[in-house]
Image (spheres, grey):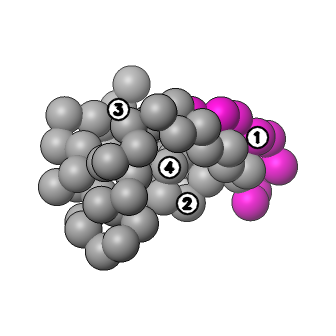
Amino acid sequence: MVKVTVQCSMCGSTSTMHVDAVLYYRWKHGELIQNVWPNRTSSWREKLKTGFCYECQKAIFAEPEE
């Protein structure tokens, strides 16, 4: 497992996510995030990819999937 800390650029909140190291490597080396984690919600993937927290995702995009 890899511990990834992300910070929301809108509100400044930080959170830590634990992800599989092999999957994280695949994503960081070019594989599409939705192909690496197809069973995760788009909100979860957005949080990992951009750092936007769920509340800020609501403000930006609409209601996120929980």
Please state if 17 lies on the left or on the right of 7 as rendered. Answer: left
Three-letter code for the amino acid on which mark 4 is drawn? Leu
For this view, does 22 lie left or right of residue 52?
A: left
- Residue nearest the viewer, comparing 5 with 22: 22
Where on the picture, by quarter, is residue 10? bottom right
| Pointer 3 or 2: first along the chain | 2
Marks 3/2: CA–CA distance: 16 Å
Tell me residue 12's x, y (percent). Answer: 83, 49
Residue 10 on the magenta span: yes
Residue 40 position in % (x across, y down): 28, 35
Tag 3 near tag 2, CB within 8 Å:
no
Q: Quick one: SS at disc 2?
A: helix
Say which mark, if any, is on residue 65.
Answer: 3
Instruction: Say what secondary structure mark 3 lies in.
Output: loop
Magenta extent: 9-17
**Which residue is the site of mark 4?**
48
Q: Residues within 10 Å of mark 2 (few under 14, many from 20)?
A: few
The residue tagged 1 is 14
User: Is label 4 in a helix, a strand or a loop?
Assistant: helix
- As measured in the structure, the alpha-carbon distance from the residue carrying label 4 to the one carrying label 1 is 11 Å
Amino acid type, callout 3 = Glu
- The answer to whether residue 51 is seen in the rendering is yes
Q: Is residue 28 magenta?
A: no
Circles 4 and 1, Cβ within 8 Å, touching? The answer is no
Toward the viewer: 25 or 54? 25
State which quarter of the image contains the C terminus.
top left
Q: Residue farthest to the right?
A: 12
Few, some or many C-alpha atoms within 10 Å of disc 1 (few <14, some 14-19, many ≥20)?
Answer: few
With respect to residue 54, does 33 lie above or below?
Answer: below
Report the residue at 41% width, 44% height from top: 21
N-term-proximal mark, 4 vs 1: 1
